[in-house]
Amino acid sequence: VDSHFQTKVPSVYAIGDAIDGPMLAHKAEEEGIACVENIAGFAGHVNYDAIPGVVYTYPELATVGQTEEQLIKAGIKYNKGTFPFMANSRARAIFDAEGMVKVLADKETDKILGMHIIGANAGEMIAEGVL
């Protein structure tokens, strides 16, 4: 599959679980839109760094964007901020204060490059890192 989702067979395209990447319905939906835009002659694009992933375990694990390892490998200078759930009054009030949030941002621009959360409701909170 090429960058426009076209296979080696003329007029056959592939998206979602049929191509590389995480098997997520919202990823496939974005790829489908981009694929149709490309077919129609527009510039279809999927920002894979803005597609969150969640592991529904206890505690939940949620991630979006790049990891520290990926940033180091790419030579990107970044700042890291971490925040423990124990410092959050709501988490302590509901007796679920185990966990943390890690935010990775570009050292020069402060653009968020990655966010990683482990703890209760991580799957809901990760949306803030996508905005």
Image (cartoon, helix red, strand yellow):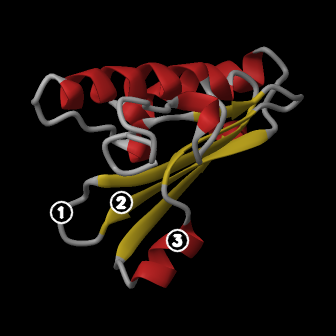
Would you say residue 88 is visible in this rendering? no
Say which of 59 and 3 sits in front: 3
Q: For the residues carrying marks 1 and 3, which lies nearer the camera in this image? A: 3
Nearer the N terminus, badge 2 or badge 3? 3
Q: Which mark is residue 55?
A: none
The amino acid at mark 2 is Ala
Q: Residue at x 55, y 25 (%)?
A: 125
Q: Which mark is residue 105?
A: 2
Q: Position of residue 20 (x, y in %)?
A: 59, 48
Q: Position of residue 130 (x, y in %)?
A: 39, 33
Would you say residue 122 is visible in this rendering? yes
Residue 118 lies in what quarter of the image? top right
Q: Residue at x 58, y 42 (%)?
A: 19
Q: CA distance from mark 2 to mark 3?
A: 13 Å
- Callouts 1 and 2 close, C-beta under 8 Å: yes
**Residue labelled with disc 3:** 70
**Residue labelled with disc 1:** 109
Q: CA distance from mark 1 to mark 2?
A: 8 Å
Q: Counting other residues with Cα less than 10 Å from the Cα at mark 1, is it few (<14), some (14-19), or many (20 or more)? A: few
Q: Residue at x 62, y 35 (%)?
A: 18
Q: Count of labels shown?
A: 3
Q: For the residues carrying marks 2 and 3, which lies nearer the camera in this image? A: 3
The amino acid at mark 3 is Gln
Quarter of the rendering occupied by the C terminus: top left
Compared across the picture, whether 60 is left or right of 1 comes to right
